[in-house]
């Protein structure tokens, strides 16, 4: 029986939280891991010095010129990249009018454009290999919007659309893409060091803004999700012959997404007659409904 070769993982935002848990699980099963974060010394403090199975690299994904050199270093060290985990990101949780255009730009620079930049740098490596697994960490907020999520959920909805479309483009090269949709996990996501709130208080929103902040502060470090179990789940998915395009993590995420599906179905049914009344003389093309836009 042939022993499979250790996989090579490239993980962004690995200093703490979900990224750290995923990296530790991959190391535990004997794989080789490139951990990246904005501060390399923080990675060394968290994981130790580089070894034959570990490489730490400084990478700020919001710097769009930084991804390719980091990927080049990883490939030079380990010879390829089998699994990419785009985990780097943060949450800007505020009511829309209490945020600024700069807040929106910063949220997208990290959560969307940074993710795209790293993916763009890794894809040529995976294409050359004719194999690869990509996990784009979205959120239940990438499927279900809510108050205070105007910027964060918008960025994660963008990740979902990007990833679903990319999955079709790269499947021909043996590359699989999975959108990971965690619910609330016990990380520092809601801690002041990570989460950002509105910077332009408006009296009309004062009561709602305070209630939302109190809710999130109360959830911090009390979330149901276990980061270590999510890390193990991603290793399981990476072992699967065929990954799902979407995978939600946590009972809270599953319940919220099921409610969203039920609501979408109810709205579709309620307005179906009006929907169908907009068709013109041309015949309906089933391929449009299945995602083939051409």
Image (tube, rainbow, N blue to C red):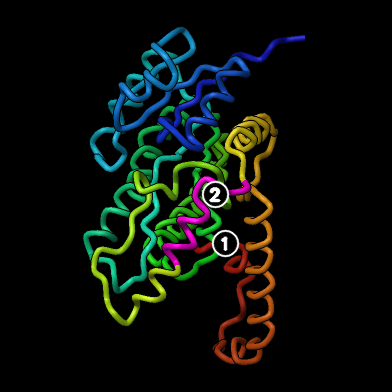
- Count of numbered marks: 2
- SS for tag 1? loop
Q: Is residue 181 visible?
A: no
Question: Badge 1: how crowded within 10 Å, few (<14), some, or many (20+)?
Answer: few
Mark sitting on residue 291: 1
Give the side of residue 139 with respect to residue 248, left or right: left
Give the side of residue 11 with respect to residue 104, left or right: right
- Give x and y (percent) for residue 197: 33, 60
Instruction: Name the residue located 27 percent from the left edge and 76 percent from the top edge.
Output: 202
For residue 214: magenta? yes
Residue 36 vertical position relative to residue 77 in the rendered view, above or below: below
For residue 35: magenta? no
Most prominent secondary structure in the magenta stretch? helix
Find residue 144 and report its image quarter. Answer: bottom right
Mark sitting on residue 102: none
Question: Badge 2: how crowded within 10 Å, few (<14), some, or many (20+)?
Answer: some
Give the side of residue 227 with respect to residue 17, left or right: right
Mark sitting on residue 168: 2
- Give x and y (percent) for residue 294: 49, 63
Residue 277 vertical position relative to residue 225 in the rendered view, above or below: below
- Give x and y (percent) for residue 206: 34, 75
Cβ–Cβ under 8 Å for marks 2 and 1: yes
Instruction: Name the residue located 29 percent from the left edge and 61 percent from the top edge.
Output: 104
Instruction: Write the start and end of the magenta stretch as one range.
Output: 212-224
- Give x and y (percent) for residue 150: 40, 67
Q: Nearer the N terminus, badge 2 or badge 1?
A: 2
| CA separation in Å, label 2 and label 1 | 9 Å
**In front: 40, or 185?**
185
- SS for tag 2? helix
Find residue 41 and report its image quarter. Answer: top left
């Amino acid at each position: 029986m042939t022993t499979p070769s250790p996989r090579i993982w490239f993980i962004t935002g690995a200093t703490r939280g979900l990224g750290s848990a995923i990296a530790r699980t991959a190391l535990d099963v004997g794989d080789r891991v490139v951990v990246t974060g904005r501060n390399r010394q923080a990675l060394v403090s968290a994981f130790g010095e580089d070894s034959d199975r570990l490489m730490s690299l400084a990478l700020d994904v919001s710097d769009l010129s930084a991804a390719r050199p980091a990927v080049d270093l990883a490939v030079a060290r380990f010879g390829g990249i089998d699994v990419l985990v785009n985990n780097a990101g943060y949450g800007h949780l505020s009511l829309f009018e209490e945020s600024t255009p700069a807040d929106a730009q910063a949220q997208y620079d990290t959560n969307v454009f940074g993710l795209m930049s790293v993916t763009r740098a890794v894809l040529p490596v995976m294409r050359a290999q004719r194999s690869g697994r990509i996990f784009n960490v979205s959120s239940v907020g990438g499927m279900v919007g809510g108050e205070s999520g105007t910027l964060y959920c918008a960025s994660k909805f963008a990740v979902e659309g990007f990833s679903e479309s990319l999955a079709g483009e790269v499947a021909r090269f043996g590359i699989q893409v999975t959108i990971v949709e965690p619910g609330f996990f016990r990380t520092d996501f809601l801690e002041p060091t990570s989460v950002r709130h509105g910077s332009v208080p408006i009296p009309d929103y004062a009561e709602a803004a305070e209630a939302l902040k109190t809710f999130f502060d109360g959830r911090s470090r009390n979330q149901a999700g276990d980061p270590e179990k999510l890390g193990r789940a991603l290793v399981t998915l990476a072992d699967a012959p065929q990954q799902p395009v979407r995978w939600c993590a946590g009972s809270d995420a599953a319940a919220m997404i099921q409610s969203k599906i039920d609501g979408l179905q109810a709205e579709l049914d309620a307005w179906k007659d009006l929907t169908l009344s907009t068709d013109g003389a041309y015949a309906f093309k089933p391929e449009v409904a299945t995602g083939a836009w051409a």
